[in-house]
Image: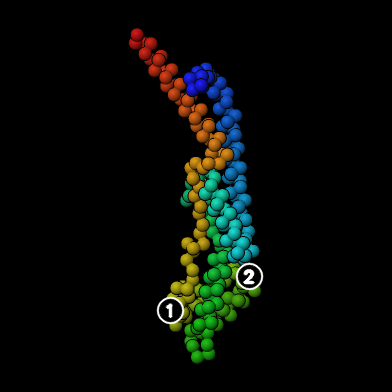
């Protein structure tokens, strides 16, 4: 039976393999595109949950995105300093709203710690808050707008006695790296896409081997 199997494989012509290869390449491209679209949908769901200020939903959507990317072949094109680069995975994305909420919480905590009638730093914070809240109303900034945080830090820095307060606030602000996500996918995964890619690769290898053998035989005949 093994011998018959080998005979059947040998009987398959190279042009027949090429005929099979063409639609397979189309199927590969389609499946890879579907995996990329699904990854984009899951990533958008994470960003939507972030905009809705729902930390529980963010964690749930992040887990779904991570599980999908880790178990599928996800090819993506990202911008790297103005250059387009092909990667396997989601590429970096940021939970901007979650970071802003955490930063605002740090500012509020700093306000509780330093605002008091007898504390000059407290007066500085109150003065900065009064200026920035007026700007927020004039410009239509919401409470979690990053412009409000920048305004507060800028106003506080104007006062000579603000060093300790500024240092305290800066130290309490969370690192942006905690809110930067980037999930990498495997180059090959045991999925439908991975199986079709494996079959395609096997056919390409057979075609290349046959082409090399044909070239070698042709060259050998020239020297006989």
Counting other residues with Cα less than 10 Å from the Cα at mark 2, is it few (<14), some (14-19), or many (20 or more)?
few
In the depicted structure, whether residue 218 falls above or below residue 183: above
Residue 170 as seen in the image, left or right of residue 29: left
| Label 2 sits on residue | 142
Which dot marks residue 163? 1
**Residue at the limit of the structure toward the top, as seen here:** 224
Residue under the image location 56 percent in, 67 percent down: 100
**Residue under the point 51% across and 57% down:** 181
Q: Are marks 2 and 1 in contact (CB under 8 Å)?
A: no
Furthest toward the front, the residue is: 1
Label 1 crowding class (10 Å Cα cut-off): few <14, some 14-19, many 20+?
A: some
Ranked by sequence position, the earlier of labels 2 and 1 is 2
Mark 1 element type: helix
Task: Name the residue at 52% across, 49% down.
Answer: 70
Task: Return the x and y of residue 184 as percentages of the image width and height.
Answer: 49, 50
Comparing 102 with 131, the one in front is 102
């Amino acid at each position: 039976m093994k011998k018959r199997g080998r005979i059947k494989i040998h009987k398959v012509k190279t042009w027949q393999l090429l005929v099979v290869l063409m639609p397979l390449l189309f199927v590969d491209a389609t499946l890879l595109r579907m995996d990329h679209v699904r990854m984009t949908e899951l990533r958008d769901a994470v960003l939507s949950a972030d905009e809705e200020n729902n930390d529980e939903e963010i964690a749930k959507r992040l887990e779904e995105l991570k599980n999908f990317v880790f178990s599928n072949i996800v090819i993506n094109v990202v911008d790297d300093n103005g250059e387009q680069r092909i990667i396997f995975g989601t590429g970096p994305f940021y939970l901007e709203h979650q970071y802003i909420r955490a930063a605002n919480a740090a500012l509020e905590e700093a306000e509780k710690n330093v605002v008091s009638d007898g504390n000059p730093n407290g007066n500085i914070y109150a003065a900065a808050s009064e200026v920035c809240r007026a700007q927020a109303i004039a410009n239509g900034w919401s409470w979690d707008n990053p412009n409000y945080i920048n305004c507060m830090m800028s106003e506080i820095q104007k006062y000579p006695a603000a060093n300790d307060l500024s240092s305290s606030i800066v130290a309490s602000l969370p690192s942006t790296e905690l809110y930067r996500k980037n999930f990498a996918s495997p180059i090959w995964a045991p999925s439908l896409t991975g199986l079709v890619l494996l079959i395609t690769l096997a056919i390409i290898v057979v075609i290349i081997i046959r082409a090399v053998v044909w070239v070698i035989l042709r060259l050998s005949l020239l020297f006989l």
